[in-house]
Image (spheres, rainbow, N blue to C red):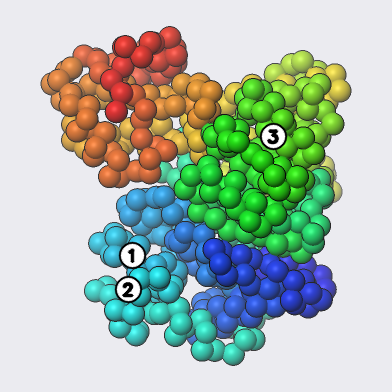
Amino acid sequence: MMRTSLHHLVTERAATHAQAPALTYKDETWSYGRLQTSIDQVASGLHTLGLAREDRVAVFLDKRLETVAAIFGTSAARGAFVPVNPLLRPAQVAYILADCGVRVLVTSAERLTLLREELTKCPALEHVVVVPSATGRDQAIARPQTDGGSYHVHLWSDLFTDHGSQPTANTPGRPVDQDMAAILYTSGSTGKPKGVVLSHRNLLVGAESVSEYLGNTSEDVILSVLPLSFDAGFSQLTTGFSAGAHVVLMNYLLPWDVARLCVRHGVTGLTCVPPLWIQLADLDWRGEATTRLRYFANTGGRMPKTTLDRLRAHFPDAKPFLMYGLTEAFRSTYLDPSEVDRRPDSIGKAIPNAEILVVRPDGSPCDAGEEGELIHRGGLVAMGYWNNPERTAERFRAVPGSESAWRVPEIAVWSGDTVVADDEGFLYFVGRKDEMIKTSGYRVSPTEVEEIAYDTGLVRDAVAVGVPDETLGHRIVLFATGLNGPDLEVAALLGLMRQQMPLYMVPSAVVVRDNLPASPNGKFDRPLLHEQAVAMTTEEVVTP
């Protein structure tokens, strides 16, 4: 069959190898046939709720079998799924739901309890589907009911298991691969997260491209460690299913949990971010975990050379893949394992079916050794930013030199990242043009950190900067003044901030000042504060 929608990755395999293992969570494994049945049931259930083409379905859950069924079932129902990071706080979740007009939310009873007050800010929300809970708390929810607002609450068992297995299209027209499939939210440099809109084609091309260079086959067992709301985390599902592989889900707790599952399931492929790899490199890897692993891959920032060397010593038969990507284009480059010894600092070359350009501000190509902006062209370029035409026009622009009297200009994503290419075309990351902070594999907006600091009511001024850190990539340092100058209770400030943001966003240090320096145009002098933060010793800051 021709793959035109995300769920076809599963449908294709289920048609020929229905009994092959597709997905495991804890002690339960679903075959491709069982996963396909669940996808069809979810699609049918969403149809009964009146889900229309490209309506948004948010999934706010830890990784589990129902999470995957809800995502791929949304595709089968011709909706657009919105995976929400399970680490986010209720206000952040509500912002995402309201921003893209989510109609259906799939979550757990425990998470719904935390969200109830914030969901009043989501006028488009009509239905909440509650998945089964090990504690049985979902049974206390009436079926169905209106939960103190305009949305109805349903049990997963009522909505997604009691319908026929074949979904029915409720809108006219045939789906094509250019239809909207997903919205992935990523931090923006100006504060609130922005939704990157991906088509089915984006997801399918990405799955095929990454699976090709990783060499995935139906014999592989892939451990899914990263969040599914993260493009590289979701790629573990798509690349695995594209090859008919077996994907094992885990919600990361401790480094030893990763090692334990690698041994238990005979994991052959593992992708992590640098902070996690640093922890895993410290483990005493032995036995089957070291012999079965076929490849390990890094994304979300540069892996320290010492960490890479230790991992290669642990896994002498595994190929290391060093990758670079951005949500707006899923994956962009990878370094061939045969080149790791020669150029371990390189982000490699373009992945299959993509071209990477390095250009000057006027769009002309840079020479070898000359710094320029990375531009990604090809089938992975996203559709744009949800409901943000200004930001879309800024980041998604015509490929330099593609203008023609007869041809519609091809759109590429201008990354905002500065890179340099050597004489052989290998790329090296230099830095970002904006002020985004990359920490623990996440992109964090300094403005969002500052806004939450202001919301505590304890600070007069606040500026967040990222400082290079060997373990985290960057650590967040917050410069702040109290309402009355230097009189600021740092512990109280951080305590309130922790209530409003996930831990990876909480500043690792606070610098208290009488006043913060300003640039000639009256704005805070961020470059100066960044320089000062880098130069500071630990005695000069207040740590949590």
Q: Where residue 110 is drawn, which disc sits there? A: 1
Q: Residue at x 51, y 81 (%)?
A: 160
The reply to whether residue 4 is in sight is no
> Label 3 belongs to which residue?
314
SS under mark 1: helix
Q: Quadrant of residue 98?
A: bottom left
Does residue 200 appear to the left or right of 70 in the view shown? right
CA distance separating discs 3 and 2: 43 Å
Question: Depth check: 245 or 98 in front?
Answer: 245
**Front label number (3 vs 2):** 3
Does residue 534 appear to the left or right of 111 in the view shown? right
Rendered position, 272 above or below 538: below
The reply to whether residue 542 is in sight is yes
Amino acid type for the residue under numbered disc 2: Arg
Q: Residue at x 53, y 42 (%)?
A: 255
Q: Position of residue 285 (x, y in %)?
A: 64, 39
Give the mark nearer the N terminus: 3 vs 2.
Answer: 2
Q: Residues within 10 Å of mark 2 (few under 14, many from 20)?
A: few
Give the mark nearer the N terminus: 1 vs 2.
Answer: 1
Q: Position of residue 361 (x, y in %)?
A: 66, 24
Question: Depth check: 345 or 329 in front?
Answer: 345
Q: Quadrant of residue 401?
A: top right
> Label 2 belongs to which residue?
137
Tag 1 near tag 2, CB within 8 Å: yes
Q: Position of residue 504 (x, y in %)?
A: 42, 38
